Amino acid sequence: MRRSNKDRTDSMRLALMAAARGLFVEKGYADTATPEIASAAGVTRGALYHHFEDKKALFAAVVADEARQVGVEIEAKAAGSSNAREALLDGARGYFDAMAVPGRTRLLLLEGPAILGLHSLQGIDAEHAEGSLKAGLANLFAATGKDPVLLGAFAQLLSAAFDRAALAIEAGGRRDQYEAAIAALVDGISLR
């Protein structure tokens, strides 16, 4: 059976992203050249540029896919939670599980902001994990009578805490301690 043009296009795009991800993780963005990516994907440079405007656009696609996968993991972990607090803590465990994938911390927390800029990365995060965090916090605020005007600020602060914890865990910190600290932060938010 013949594959459609869309199937071939999707397949080539995924192959380019997979090859680029591997090289970006292994060598870093700056030390990865587009000919290497094309070669690793088994395509020509022309094919790479047909699918992506440049290396930065390819990197952005890789980062967006990584962020999407993190969001999926968070949602999956929090889905069966019995209350708002547990949903946030289960989502935190999902985040730490997702960030344990080799190379993901480098892509999302180190090179992503440096290459794409904070504003672009915040946009990518807004499409994926940020919505889950804000929804979880909104539920916690509603359950505890907190003023929702502070929701955005709490979401940004808690998101930064998650990211710093992921970096620390990646560097050898004890995950159980960071999970306990996140629980303390969530419990502090819910105090009246």
Image (cartoon, rainbow, N blue to C red):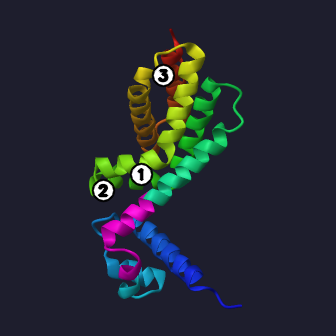
Q: What is the three-letter code of the residue carrying label 1?
A: Ile
Q: Are marks 2 and 3 in contact (CB under 8 Å)?
A: no
Circle 2 residue: 116
Quarter location, residue 46: bottom left
Q: Please state which of the two labelled residues, at mark 2 or mark 3, is closer to the viewer.
A: 2
Q: Give the vertical position of 192 relative to 14 (above or below).
A: above
Residue occupying the point 53% across, 20% down: 141
Q: Please state which of the two labelled residues, at mark 2 or mark 1, is closer to the viewer.
A: 1
Q: CA distance from mark 2 to mark 1?
A: 10 Å
Q: Residue furthest bottom?
A: 2
Q: Give the vertical position of 119 relative to 149 (above or below).
A: below
Q: What is the three-letter code of the residue carrying label 3?
A: Leu
Q: Nearer the viewer, residue 148 or 173?
A: 148
Q: Residue furthest top?
A: 192
Q: Give the vertical position of 34 relative to 100 (above or below).
A: below
Q: Which residues are magenta?
A: 48-63
Pointer 1: residues within 10 angstroms few (<14), some, or many (20+)?
many
Quarter location, residue 7: bottom right
Secondary-structure class at tag 2? helix
Q: Nearer the viewer, residue 153 or 106?
A: 153
- Where does the image place residue 132, in percent across and percent down from the top left? 54, 39
Sequence-wise first label, 2 or 1: 2
Membership of 98 in magenta stretch: no
Circle 1 residue: 124
Circle 3 residue: 185
Pointer 3: residues within 10 angstroms few (<14), some, or many (20+)?
some
Pointer 2: residues within 10 angstroms few (<14), some, or many (20+)?
some
Residue occupying the point 54% across, 76% down: 10
Sequence-wise first label, 3 or 1: 1
Q: How many numbered callouts? A: 3
Q: What is the three-letter code of the residue carrying label 2?
A: Leu
